[in-house]
Amino acid sequence: MLYCFSSFSTRTEVKVANLVCFIIIIITITTIILLLIIIIIIFLFGLVLVVIAVVAVVVVHLVLLLRRRRRRRHRHGRKKPYSFFDDLGNVVGFDVDIVSRVCAIAGKQCEIVLAEFTECTFTNREITYPGRGLMSGWFDACPGYVISVDRKTAFDFTDPYLYTDASFTVAPGNPSDFNPDISDFSQFTFAHLTGAVTNEKCLDRLNKKAKNFVVAANLPDARAMLLNGTADVLFSPRHKIDGLEILPQRVHCDAGGSAVMLKRGSPLAQWWNPAFQTLKKSGEYQALCPISSIKYNAALALSMGWLRLGFGCRNDGISAEVSAVAMTMSMMEP
């Protein structure tokens, strides 16, 4: 038998002492176990806090990264150099500069506002319609839109100030073996953006036989159609689309370049056109092309042949009007 104490004289005292000793040992062991459990709980709790902190840091980092990418897309957005957000969130670009100068010459107060491009124009069953925003007077004009035969039946336009053309875009490697130089496109399915002048009617005017068309709500939708095989070709005013192949052939769907698109009967062109001609005669308009190329780091060049017709800036990159968000213009009397 184990004795905790040996100084007791009687057996009863020894038994009591051993019982007390046993109780003390049990209490000590229990206390140690409880302390270990508490330490383990504290450790696990701390570990959980560390994991939560790490996850929070990762989430915050991802959110900030997505925000930076979103801001970067705005800065280098689909309408650069025409209209896009700078680092401070201001709308800037060639269209903004043109509007500002023409309005200043005309003595008008003009405000730049943003809207979905379908508020300017959209396509339904291959018919081009004016957008709700333009028709309802939410704004007065949509700068940078192509003048075309079918649009002339629905809109008025100012004098043109941009050269424009159209191109054919395919998936990488041109899996459908599309050739823009042939005249019969019957075997191919074309995608075009809603409201764009690059549509079935334009191909008809180009003496191209085509019968299969799908309308894309926006550029990402059109890109997806090419990549998933819904469409073989995207017919658009764009010269650069990430992840797709732009064929070198160029055609014209316009009837005189790009201009400020107006609601039918709008009086805006009555003061805009004289002011724009003043800007052009002063030489300032011609200077805007190379200045904008440097200012906005984009390929805006001066096309002298088109300049004689009233507009000279052309862009070797993207279309002025194809974007999820359009710059529109509201005019206020001074």
Image (cartoon, grey):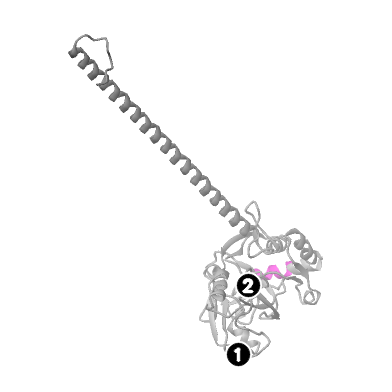
Q: Which mark is residue 244?
A: 2
- The amino acid beneath tag 2 is Leu
Between 169 and 56, which is closer to the camera in this rendering? 56
Q: Position of residue 59 (x, y in %)?
A: 51, 49
Q: Which residue is at a point 54% across and 51% down the rendered structure image? A: 62
Tell me the crowding category of disc 2: few under 14, some 14 to 19, or many 20 or more residues within 10 angstroms, Cα based.
some
Which segment did they paint magenta? 267-275
Tell me the crowding category of disc 1: few under 14, some 14 to 19, or many 20 or more residues within 10 angstroms, Cα based.
some
Q: Position of residue 260 (x, y in %)?
A: 65, 70
Q: Position of residue 177 (x, y in %)?
A: 63, 84
Magenta part, dominant SS:
helix
Q: Which mark is residue 219?
A: none
Between 204 and 28, which is closer to the camera in this rendering? 28
Q: Which residue is at a point 56% across and 50% down the rendered structure image? A: 64
* Residue position marked by numbered label 1 in the rendering: 209
- The amino acid beneath tag 1 is Lys
**For this view, does 289 lie left or right of residue 73?**
right
